[in-house]
Image: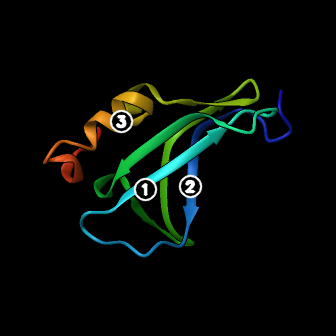
Amino acid sequence: MDETGDRAVYGYIGKLDLHAEMVLAIPFFGSLQNTPIHIAYMPIKMIRQHTRGYRCLPALFKSGKAQPRRDHRMFFDDEGLRNLEKLDFKDMEVV
């Protein structure tokens, strides 16, 4: 197990300047890799307010690496990149 331990949700918490057409791209790296093992392309509807600014937690952390959460896979990697081209991308969210 990685020193951060397993987590049911994992992603970004912090300050952001938001606008309606924004995409939050979150790279997730493996412990020994210099290139991301996953990239999440998150629409504004999936970014929530948080006491430290905003939060977007599309991944989980298990056995030392980040993985897409089952219901968030449509925002990751090639599928997420394809979804960016959709006119309704900014309104996409997990139900």
| Picture residue at 48% right of the left edge, 30% below the top | 69
Q: Residue furthest bottom?
A: 17
Neighbour class for label 2 at 10 Å: few (<14), some, many (≥20)?
some
Residue 68 position, x and y percent, is: 50, 30
Question: Is residue 43 depicted above or below 48 in this figure?
Answer: above
Q: Amino acid at mark 1?
A: Leu
Q: Quadrant of residue 17?
A: bottom left
Residue beneath label 2, please? 12
Camera sees residue 12: yes
**Which of the two labelled residues, at mark 3 and mark 2, occupies the earlier sequence position?**
2
Viewer-nearest of discs 3 and 2: 3
Local crowd size for mark 1, using a 10 Å CA cut-off: few (<14), some (14–19), many (≥20): some
Q: Quadrant of residue 78?
A: top left
Q: Is residue 60 left or right of residue 49?
A: right
Disc 3 marks which amino acid?
Gly
Distance of label 3 from label 1 (alpha carbons): 11 Å
**Tags 1 and 2 in contact by the CB under 8 Å rule?**
yes
SS for callout 1: strand
Q: Nearer the viewer, residue 90 or 9?
A: 90
Q: Residue furthest right?
A: 3
Mark on residue 80?
3
Q: Nearer the viewer, residue 47 or 32?
A: 32
Q: Amino acid at mark 2?
A: Tyr
Q: In the rendered view of the protein, which quadrant contains the C terminus? A: top left
Across the whole image, how many numbered discs are drawn on residues?
Answer: 3
Q: CA distance from mark 3 to mark 2?
A: 17 Å
Asked if labels 1 and 3 touch by Cβ distance under 8 angstroms, the answer is no
The numbered mark, 1 or 2, whose residue comes first in the sequence reads 2
Which residue: 72% across, 33% down? 30
Specify few, some or many for label 3: CA neighbours under 10 Å numbering under 14, 14-19, or 20 or more: many
Pointer 1: what residue?
A: 24
Q: Residue at x 56, y 48 (%)?
A: 11
